[in-house]
Amino acid sequence: MSAPVETRPHREIPAHQGGLGYRFAAAVATPGGAVFLLAIGLLVATMVANENFADPGVVVRFLGRTAPIAIAAMGQYFVIVSGEFDLSMAAVVTTQVVMAGNLIGQDEGRIVPVTCLMLLVGAGIGLVNGLATTILRVPSFIVTLGTMLALAGLVRYLTGGAATGNPVDSFREIGRGGIEDVPVVEVLPYPLLIFLALAVYAQWLMRRPFGRSLIAAGDNPNAATLSGTPLWWVKTRAFILSSLSATIAGIILVGYAGVHPKVGEGYEFAAITAVVLGGVLLGGGRGWVLSAACGAFALELLFTLLTVLDVESTWRDTVQGLIIIAAVAVAGRAWTVGRKPRGGRGARRTEPLGSTTNQPTQGPITGDN
Amino acid sequence: MRRFRGALASAAALLVVATACSTDDSVDDPPASGDNQSEAGSDTDWFVQEDFDRQDEQRSATFEGDPSKPYLQYIDGEMTDTSKFKVNGPQKVCFANASISNPWRQTGWITMNQQLKVLQDKGVISEMETRDAQDDDNTQLSDIDYFIKEANCDAFVISPNSTAAMTPAVEDACKTGKPVVVFDRGVETDCATTFIHPIGGYAWGIDTANFLVDHLEEGDHVVALRILPGVDVLETRWAAAKKIFDENGIDATDYFTGADPTKIKEIITDELTKGEVDGVWMDAGDGAVAAIEAFEDQGVDYPVITGEDEMSFLRKWKETGLTGLAPVYSNFQWRTPLLALEKIFKGEPVPKEWVLPQVPITEDERDEFLEANEGMPDGHYAKFGGEDLPGYPEVWQERRIP
Amino acid sequence: MSRLTSALQGRTLTSTGIVYLVLLLAVVAGAILTGLEGRNFFSQGNISSILTGTSILGFIAIGQTLVILVGSLDLSVPYVVSLVSVLAADRMAGETSHVPQAVLVALLVAALVGLANGVIVAWLGVHGFVASLGVGLVISGYLATNYQGNTGSAPRDFRLIGANQIGPVPVSTLIMLGCAVAAILLLRRTRVGHHMYAVGGNREVARLSGIRTSVPVITAHVLCSVLAGFAGLLLLARLSVGSPTIGQQGGYDLMSIAAVVLGGTLLAGGKGNVTGTLAGVAIFAVMDNVMGVMEVNPFLKDVVRGVVIVAAVALYARREIDRRPARFERPSTLDAALQEAR
């Protein structure tokens, strides 16, 4: 005789662990979230130090000029979260800038074809980086180092070390101009708009299977491969995205800074610093793309604050170094909090449904978006 | 038996070592130098009053020679007797170049090569072997060492990467008994047959700072954009300018830019947000356009600015109509070393210290230089002095680095 | 016959073997190209020029090998080189009597920098790339603020180290090779050395096996910075003055990492050896020498370097590399020689 199976009354499992306030506080407590606080704190400090910075127009224009490095940081994020490095960014930026200068010249009709060429070249470089890393199994550090040397040398060789001149002004408007007559802020710089569009795109991309696979590839490549992820194609696409973001940064910089072989110098280290400041772990597997972008803003705000405080320019490097170490040390500690299955340490146990099921302890955030 | 073999082997090794040991002759004590900079102590000031005064005088000195050939002009002074160097037939020249890592050096390098062609056609020089040190002191030491040992040079031309570090190497070259021509940056020995350079950094600083002081008022704010610390030709420029700014009550803040236009623009924009910027001083004009554009982007009046004779600055200067000055570091000095060697090989005397004219381009002269250099790339320098060389103007327009 | 087939199957040809083959190839190509220019590749002057080129990068690359073996990176080496050069030069101030004290102080400072690197990596859990980048930037700011150019001076006796030669071999190269031997002994014969391989291979497993993982990491970083200090002293001997930018001028950070990886050491750590690194350094020196003789356009030199680095590493990156020195198999020739010497 079969008795009806008694369904034990079970609690409603809540969709989230806590209310909105709790979740917000928990998000901010992570390195990825804390960088936003850092950026806001630096902005406030700058405004306090010099009231001219409190003008919304000034702030918006500052955001506009930081857009290229933020875009580069997002590109670098894709590569770093998958566990690799892209050191060739600076060389890609310089190559694109010089290409724009030399190929567009003063001919407006050439803007569109040359821009397409630049994007193609950027994607091509990313493809080379990606394939060399995944198929040839050369460490990405080495591949991108080689690409950086080869590109930088090639560009200087072909142009004789200095570019012909700045391209036509309408192309430079992308980097220098903006939407005029906007209330409150006066001008909305185009670079800022480009950045916002790309940020939305990047966030959407990370929620797609591609984004999830990217994080999986960085977290545990073996598991990802065994689960059927085409690791080589995922990582190669990350490199392509990185080079394309460097290309777009280059297009903006043509407008902002003009054409010069020194434009873009140091971008790879600046981008990696920004990503790391944004709480993304080197070695991959953790981090949020928008906090990488915010890391770029925080870094630039730091430099501006130093200028406003009249800190001797020679000490900038030291300050930057200390901040990087501090930020990453804190981030490293924070990510490990709650991961270890120790009782009471940020663990939240739901009531056991069955006696033997072992509930995995959950930290506040686990590297998810 | 084994022990005997071991002893024999070690004895043989010792013998070989003892006979093969050799020392470079360059390891002599550094010469007693009159320069402050080589003294121990990290906070050595770059400012040397006597150099400042001397260069101030030289700005208005008379130069011997034809003004239409400024690269051959010099200030009269001690001459080197070169009769012992007199030779017949084409000679081989070895050139140890510091680098071609900035547009000024690239322009000069192209000019030098065209000058070489002329002298090769004349049969004065057979070939010029060049080693590029890529801005590394250590590499340049090896380069000069290689030249001395391996290259069978008949003459040395050296553009030193840094002053004190290159001194022993230059002395090595002098010891070979062949003529040694040093140009651009100097070294701390005067053993060279001739040392070619324009008047110098102090003169640049005086010309530019005086220009700014004349066009500004006491209490005005000047932003000084400097490329790198520690390069003596650049440090002397700032040292002189700072002195004049301080004496005239001009408030000057200096920044290091690395010649990166992005950084230049950001620095100027931040300074403009902080307050007013009335003048911009640059220790080299590369990137001046970005500085000017920063003012445009902020919608503020143009400053009084001193750049350099780089085409990008000259063009922007004309376009905007601002008050400016283009100091020069006489790019045509790249022609003089080979021409000096021509004289040396003929046994003609050359100045011990060959001081070339260094005349800034003022607004009146600017347009004629712009016309003469039309079609040249932005990174070209107006006073390159190569108008009468073969390949003009295509070689500089195409900017093919030899 | 069986040895031939097994060699063809690649079993006896390790990564180190391949690197030395590449070096041989480079020497042959170099000799041919130099000959085309009318010079003798094997002349005394040329060989000593190549060997001088290996000394500086060699010191730094040996140190970098140790650091990479434990799974870290050291990007602060150029700044350490510059710092040591100015500190030692200032203390020496041209007096021979000051030399030992100056050398000691400078190397002590270098060791402290290495200690900082190691502690940040091991105790704060910061990735080596970021830790050493940060420390390097801190030193960079210090140098830029306090030094505006060449400073101090080295007395004649000290400069002999940079100038003396035994035949075509500079004394500095011999010292560098001595350091290499010491590093090899450290890795193969001492406990710390074996622990370095263990920690680099898998830190968690090493920790669970009872190794104090911070000790090999800190040791590697300290040794790396001290070796960079040696390079700084050698540069001081060659230049006769201290220079706050000499380290950065040579690009030693990325070049040393490239030489180490070229030599077959795995960038992730745990596999590799110093012998391969020496071959990597030699390959770069030969390349630079040949390109100099051929008067290659300086811009193209970088292109060649970049392509060679990637191509050479690609040659053996897919293969397995010896994980550990063989302990229970027939000893290698080096081990046998060391055993004989005891």
Image (tube, rainbow, N blue to C red):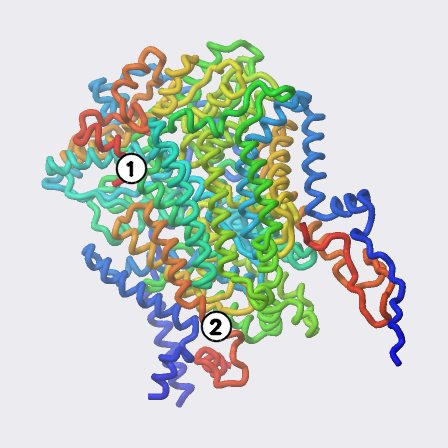
**Residue B250 drawn above or below residue C309:** above
Q: Residue at x 23, y 40 (%)?
A: B179
Q: What is the crowding at mark 2: few (fewer than 14 residues within 10 Å), some, or many (at least 20)?
A: some
In the rendered view, does B141 fall on the left or right side of A17? left
Residue C210: quarter of image: bottom right
Q: Residue at x 44, y 45 (%)?
A: C249
Q: CA distance from mark 2 to mark 1?
A: 54 Å
Q: Nearer the viewer, residue A281 or C208?
A: A281
**Residue C299 drawn above or below residue B256:** below
The image's mark for residue C321 is: 2
Q: Residue at x 44, y 28 (%)?
A: A172
Closest to the camera, between mark 2 and mark 1, is: 2
- Residue A188, position as x, y percentages in the image: 57, 25
Parent chain of label 1: B
Q: Amino acid at mark 1?
A: Ala
- Residue A227, position as x, y percentages in the image: 59, 66
Residue placed furthest toward the front: A1
Q: What is the crowding at mark 1: few (fewer than 14 residues within 10 Å), some, or many (at least 20)?
A: many
**Residue B273 drawn above or below residue C29:** above
